[in-house]
Image (cartoon, rainbow, N blue to C red):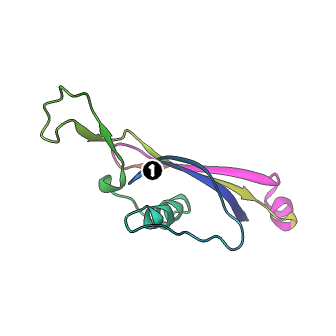
Amino acid sequence: MQLRAFSIEGFRSLTHVTGIPVSGPTILAGHNDGGKTAILDALAFLLGTYKPTDDDRTYEVGPPEATEVSHGLSRCGSTLVEGDFELDAWERAEFLLPASLRLRRVLNEDTTTRY
């Protein structure tokens, strides 16, 4: 199974990033605090090797009249990471799956996760 593209919503600084292509090799480059580690952690979350916390959920700005201690900032309702995978002939035959597969993992407000 090979990852071909992925999308991230509501994960740290990655509010809504879609259609990130993956090929060989894929290089992540950018300024400090630009989201490179967030991308890697989001992919690890998709694959089940990273357990996100409430701090991983993106902040959303509330209405200006909000009087919360956070000054109108709250965490997003859900975080999701979605990957488009390509399966080889053996994987398709062995697991009776199509040639391509989309996998989505969601982190809910209460930090429970689901596929």
Badge 1 amino acid? Thr
Q: At x 83% / y 65%, what residue is drawn?
A: 88
Residue 42 position, x and y percent, is 49, 59
Residue 104 versus residue 35 in the image, above or below: above
**Residue 115 visible to an observer of this rendering:** no
Residue 71 position, x and y percent, is 16, 38
**Residue 105 visible to an observer of this rendering:** yes
- From the viewer's perspective, is 108 left or right of 45? left
* Residue 63 position by quadrant: top left
- From the viewer's perspective, is 99 left or right of 44? right
- From the viewer's perspective, is 39 left or right of 111? right
| Residue at image mark 1 | 113
Residue 87 position, x and y percent, is 79, 61
Asked whether 46 falls inside the magenta stretch, the response is: no
Residue 15 versus residue 22 in the image, above or below: above
Q: At x 17% / y 42%, what residue is drawn?
A: 70
Residue 57 position, x and y percent, is 36, 50
Q: Dot 1, how many residues are within 10 Å of its Cα: few (below 14), some (14-19), or many (20+)?
A: some
Q: At x 63% / y 51%, what residue is drawn?
A: 103
Residue nearer the viewer, 110 or 40: 40
Span colored in magenta: 90-110
Q: At x 71% / y 57%, what residue is drawn?
A: 85
* Residue 21 position by quadrant: bottom right
